[in-house]
């Protein structure tokens, strides 16, 4: 139904990842082979997205995405209702927790194997070998 553009209004969730590339949602190419369901056709915005995705470094991509956002704001092909915000509470008793960027809920557990609650240094002294034979023989 969305691809056929048989709607007056559509409520669509765009679950973009951590990469700011929105080419598949808003480029001219995405009208035909993507998710540009509204058929927004803006050459300058599309070129900005194409040029931005050619670069790996996010700082170098920033001017292209700024151009895209200006075009998007001028034409307003869609209205953003909300963006997911993941908020997690964690006790101060948990040690070695490092939570970086969370793109998906599962990302909060990336270093879960390193977390621990208690840390206590314990020294264990083993009995000398001669005492061991006495213990086992008696």
Image: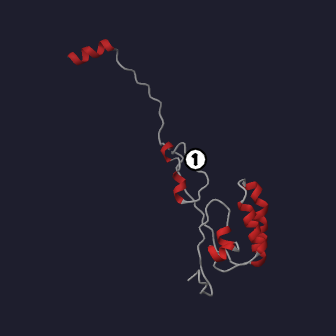
Q: Which residue is mark 1?
A: 98
- Category of crowding for the residue at label 1, using alpha-carbon neighbours closer than 10 angstroms: few (below 14), some (14–19), many (at least 20): few
Q: Is residue 130 above or below residue 85?
A: above
**Residue at the image position 54 percent from the left and 54 percent from the top:** 108
Frontmost residue, 50 versus 116: 50
Frontmost residue, 97 versus 67: 67
Q: With 81 as the anchor, is 113 left or right in this view?
A: left
Q: With 5 as the anchor, is 136 left or right in this view?
A: left
Q: Is residue 46 above or below residue 128?
A: below
Q: Say how many tags the image has.
A: 1
- Please provide percent x and percent y for residue 126: 37, 20
- In the rendered image, is residue 26 in sight? yes
- In the rendered image, is residue 89 in sight? no
| SS at badge 1 | loop
**Residue at the image position 68 percent from the left and 68 percent from the top:** 23
Tell me which corner region of the image, top left, top right, bottom left or bottom right, holds residue 72: bottom right
Looking at this view, name the residue that lies furthest to the left: 138
- Please provide percent x and percent y for residue 116: 48, 42
For the C terminus, give its image quadrant.
top left
Frontmost residue, 132 versus 107: 107
**Residue at the image position 29 percent from the left and 16 percent from the top:** 132
What's the colour scheme?
secondary structure
Frontmost residue, 128 versus 19: 19
**Residue at the image position 44 percent from the left and 25 percent from the top:** 123
- Please provide percent x and percent y for residue 107: 54, 55
Q: With 127 as the anchor, is 107 left or right in this view?
A: right
- Please provide percent x and percent y for residue 28: 70, 74
For the N terminus, give its image quadrant.
bottom right
């Amino acid at each position: 139904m969305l691809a056929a553009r048989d709607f007056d209004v559509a409520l669509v969730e765009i679950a973009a990842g951590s990469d700011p590339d929105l080419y598949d949602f808003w480029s001219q190419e995405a009208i035909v082979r993507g998710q540009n369901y509204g058929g927004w056709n803006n050459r300058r915005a599309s070129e900005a997205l194409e040029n931005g995705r050619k670069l790996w470094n996010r700082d170098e991509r920033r001017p292209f995405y700024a151009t895209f956002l200006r075009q998007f704001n001028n034409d307003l092909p869609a209205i953003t209702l909300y963006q997911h915000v993941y908020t997690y509470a964690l006790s101060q008793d948990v040690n070695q927790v490092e939570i970086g960027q969370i793109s998906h809920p599962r990302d909060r557990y990336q270093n879960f194997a390193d977390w621990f609650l208690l840390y206590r240094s314990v020294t264990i002294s083993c009995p000398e070998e001669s005492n061991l034979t006495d213990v086992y023989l008696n």
